[in-house]
Image (tube, helix red, strand yellow):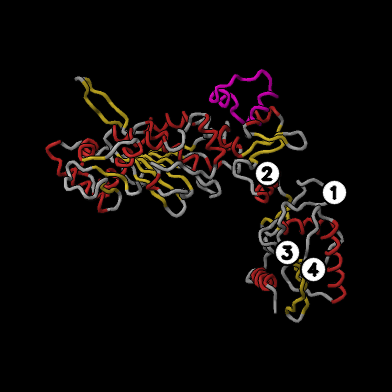
């Protein structure tokens, strides 16, 4: 019976030979064994560093033509590969092999399994002499790729992984906005470069390498990059702000991609977003005043949450802020770790706790749980519809809505607002009543049955419940969230 790897190897070989012969990342053809042991060691390193491992196929030339091997050739190849796998790599690699017949010709398949400890590099050299497969070829890894592979192998968090390596102290200070770090943390700027970099090291924004050069961690780059485009692995994580002409995506007025790190660029990002918002006109004491459509405190909190709680492992996507004429959407990659209905009362859980902790200390986000409360309180003060929190397959979205009269709100809008109002009161040691609901929706006292109807809709949706289920007076009843 064939082993699983043999079945996989045969399928890959068949795929590589037709319809148009081409080598694959998981497979390399060889007509015979090379006398260059170092090159063969590189192949073994590359396949050991490849997810699922890979195969050397002997008896197939560079054109994908099966040439076959004699038994003495097979024996010689097996012996030489075994020696190289044991002696030419820093960590010995265990290989396996089998012989198959194609077009009545013998082909040797050598299986190099994926190593559990990566990267596998050449013996007698540094870890940077590690190899990988790319477009069917064996190539040397870049320093950044080596660092990332080590991090993944050791289970390092995103923040601990390396974004840029082999820098001098001057190189670190040119790449990171160190002045913003010291200003935001309320610390005096040190007099010399060595002390500056040491302070960044204490925050785990940079790390000292074994060769006395410096590396910038992902956390250092994503928070304090002067230009995030200089960090190739993170450039797609820059924040995008898109402004649309109407209520859909048909016509974008402008699209801007942030360049600075999240921390050093946060105030500028919020100011830019506020500048893009429509305004509402109000008259106060006979003076006409313009106000931005959404409260800044809510935007700050929702944007900060999106930055902190995103899933950095999802490639090719970033935090996005989209401004429409009737709403504003803030989307981040990754699903939330808690129920979206419990954002108000539950302390947030973050995939990126080190990043979240530093941003709290830098006063960019609130202490646990309090920020959402402040955001919702400001939205209520602006008499805006309740924001919508959505959990999708691979992203989280918060939508804030422009002002709408109660008569323009649908049932879902009313229930969401009533529930969030009830939660906000509960976490403040207050209780929702008909009176508080009238105040939330700007309903006249004489129209208290409208408030009662909204409360009834929210009860039927199982989002709130009476504090005293036995009470017969709706007008004087009190209510608490379903989870209370």
Q: Nearer the viewer, mark 4 or mark 2?
A: 2
Marks 3 and 2, Cα distance to the nearest angstrom?
Answer: 25 Å
Can residue 325 be seen here?
yes
Secondary structure beneath disc 3? strand
Secondary structure beneath disc 2? helix
> Residue beneath label 1, please?
124
Q: Quadrant of residue 387?
A: top left
Give the total number of marks visible in the rendering. 4
Q: Is 18 drawn above or below residue 267 in the view shown?
A: below
Marks 4 and 2, Cα distance to the nearest angstrom?
Answer: 34 Å
In the rendered structure, does residue 395 fall within the stretch colored magenta? Answer: no
- Quarter the N terminus occupies: bottom right
Marks 3 and 4, Cα distance to the nearest angstrom?
Answer: 10 Å
Is the C-beta separation of discs 3 and 2 under 8 Å?
no
Residue at horizontal 69 percent and vertical 48 percent from the top? 150
Marks 2 and 1, Cα distance to the nearest angstrom?
Answer: 21 Å
Marks 1 and 4, Cα distance to the nearest angstrom?
Answer: 29 Å
> Residue beneath label 2, please?
144
Secondary structure beneath disc 1? loop
Find the magenta span and give its range.
174-201
> Residue beneath label 3, please?
28
Residue at horizontal 22 percent and vertical 38 percent from the top? 441
């Amino acid at each position: 019976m064939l082993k699983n790897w043999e079945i996989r190897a045969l399928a890959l070989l068949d795929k590589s030979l037709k319809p148009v012969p081409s080598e694959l990342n998981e497979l390399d053809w060889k007509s015979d064994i090379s006398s260059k042991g170092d090159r063969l060691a590189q192949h073994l390193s590359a396949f050991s560093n490849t997810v699922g491992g890979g195969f050397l196929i002997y008896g197939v030339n560079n054109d994908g033509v099966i040439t076959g091997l004699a038994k003495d050739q097979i024996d010689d190849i097996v012996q030489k590969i075994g020696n190289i796998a044991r002696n030419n790599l820093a960590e010995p690699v265990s290989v396996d092999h089998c012989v198959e017949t194609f077009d009545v010709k013998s082909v040797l398949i050598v299986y190099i399994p994926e190593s559990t400890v990566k990267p596998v590099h050449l013996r007698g050299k540094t870890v940077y002499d590690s190899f990988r497969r790319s477009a069917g070829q064996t190539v040397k890894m870049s320093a950044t790729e080596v660092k990332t592979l080590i991090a993944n192998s050791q289970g390092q968090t995103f923040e601990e992984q390396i974004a840029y390596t082999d820098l001098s102290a001057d190189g670190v200070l040119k790449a990171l906005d160190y002045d913003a770090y010291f200003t935001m943390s309320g610390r005096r700027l040190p007099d010399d470069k060595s002390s500056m970099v040491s302070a960044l090291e204490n925050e785990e924004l940079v790390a000292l390498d074994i060769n006395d050069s410096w590396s910038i961690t992902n956390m250092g780059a994503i928070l304090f990059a002067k230009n995030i485009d200089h960090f190739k692995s993170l450039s797609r994580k820059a924040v995008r702000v898109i402004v649309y002409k109407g209520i859909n995506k048909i016509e974008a007025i402008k699209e801007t991609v942030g360049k600075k790190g999240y921390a050093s660029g946060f105030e500028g990002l919020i100011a830019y977003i506020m500048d893009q918002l429509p305004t509402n006109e109000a008259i106060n004491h006979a003076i006409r005043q313009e106000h931005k459509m959404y409260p800044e405190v809510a935007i700050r909190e929702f944007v900060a949450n999106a930055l902190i709680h995103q899933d950095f492992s999802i490639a090719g996507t970033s935090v996005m802020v989209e401004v429409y004429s009737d709403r504003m959407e803030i989307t981040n990659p990754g699903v939330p770790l808690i129920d979206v209905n419990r954002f108000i009362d539950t302390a947030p859980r973050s995939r990126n706790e080190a990043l979240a902790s530093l941003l709290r200390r830098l006063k960019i986000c609130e202490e646990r749980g309090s920020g959402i409360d402040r955001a919702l309180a400001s939205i209520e003060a602006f008499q805006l519809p309740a924001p919508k929190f959505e959990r999708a397959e691979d992203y989280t979205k918060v939508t804030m809505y422009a002002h709408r009269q109660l008569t323009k709100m649908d049932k879902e809008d009313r229930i969401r607002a009533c529930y969030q109002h009830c939660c906000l009161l509960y976490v403040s040691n207050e209780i929702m009543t008909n009176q508080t609901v009238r105040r939330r929706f700007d309903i006249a006292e004489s129209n208290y049955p409208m408030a009662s109807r909204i409360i009834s809709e929210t009860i039927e949706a199982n989002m709130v419940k009476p504090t005293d289920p036995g009470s017969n007076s709706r007008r004087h009843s009190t209510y608490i969230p379903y989870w209370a």
